[in-house]
Amino acid sequence: MRALGVDPGTGNFDILCIEDDVDHVVLDETIPSSTVAEKPQEVVELVLSARPDIVVGPSGYGLSFKKLSEIDEKDLALTTLERRSDYGAPVLSGVRSMLRMLREKNVNGCTLPGVIQLPTVPIHRKFNKIDMGTADKTCVTAYAVWDQSRVHGVRYDETCLICVEMGLGYNAAMAVENGKIVDGVGGTIFPGPGYLSIGLMDGELAYLLNGFSKRTLFEGGVSWIATGSKVEVEKFAAGLSTSYADAFRCFVEGVGKAVAMLAAVMDKTPREVILTGRLSRVESIREAVASWLQRRLGFKARRPLNVFAKRAKDVAMG
């Protein structure tokens, strides 16, 4: 069986298709999100060229497990939660366009739930929240569970971890006990800035902004704090200990706070923290975060050890 997954990232859409197992990769591509928004048909044709038996479509904030043939315009709106008058973020329009085209071509596929839609998360942890981790965070956490199972030789229902996704846009953290996601801190409630996104926003700041566009949620992150704009990750990494030190300290402590929040409500002590996402692949950033978690919280942190894609990133593997 050929299974294909799509990761709708802030900067790029990753597409990965495997046949039967991870040893046989059929398609491994990454495409700028702006291209997906402008030419979604070309991306859909690429998906179809892999001849997948099942496609996990880009699901945004998540939908209860649903066949692509069954999704309607309300479902599409729920995946991105973007006002019609506010359309503008390439990743969001790309998600909607891709889902429509996959549906029109009768592709055998499905959407996936975000963390808040999972029945394994207790209801009291969902009050007053929307973003506990988007559907792609559900996927990357599944990848972390699979990786821990292989690395430590334990069954899926014996895994216990916190997965921290440090993407180009947002950070997120998810708690896993007995192989199940039990809590999550999504990118828009994350207690510190992501690379591009502001993360948790002070309610008084939101009030003073007096209404703002969805694009605002993609700004205000550590890159903006350090430079006032969006800069390449590698350029930012080169200044971690000099001109960008204060901004980076804010970023690292935000990750630490998220991990501590989740650990505080877990019944078991997590075996480790697994770091995923674009920024986790930058050695200086990863090592600084891992060192802080070990020194302050006593948690070992690492990248996944079982990587089977060369271009697509962690979410697509999940």
Image (tube, helix red, strand yellow):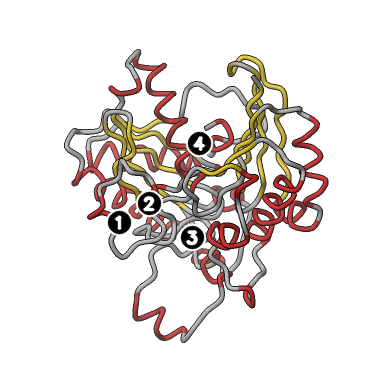
Q: Is residue 211 above or below residue 293?
A: below
Q: In the image, is residue 54 above or below residue 191?
A: above
The dot on residue 283 is 4
Residue 116 numbered tag: 2
* Residues marked 3 and 2 touching at CB (< 8 Å): no
Going from N to C along the chain, the mark reached first, 4 or 2, is: 2
What whole-number distance in Å separates the C-alpha atoms at marks 1 and 3?
A: 27 Å
User: Secondary structure beneath disc 4?
Assistant: helix
For disc 1, the marked residue is 126
Q: Are marks 2 and 1 in contact (CB under 8 Å)?
A: yes
Instruction: From the viewer's perspective, tell me whether residue 271 is left or right of residue 303.
Output: left
What number is the disc on residue 297? none
Q: Is residue 257 left or right of residue 87?
A: left
Judge by depth and name the residue closer to the eye, 129 or 153.
Answer: 129
Residue 281 picture location, percent across and down: 53, 37
Q: CA distance from mark 2 to mark 1?
A: 6 Å
Work out whether mark 1 precedes mark 3 in sequence or the reverse, and give the earlier one. Answer: 1
What's under tag 2, amino acid-wise? Ile
Q: What distance separates the C-alpha of mark 4 from that of mark 2?
A: 31 Å
**Element under label 1?**
loop
Considering depth in this image, is 30 or 42 the residue closer to the camera? 42
Q: Quadrant of residue 162?
A: top left
Q: Does label 3 or label 2 sit earlier along the sequence?
A: 2
User: Residue 269's image quarter?
Assistant: top left
Residue at position x 58%, y 35% in the image: 316
> Which of the two residues, 27 or 103, is positioned nearer the viewer here?
103
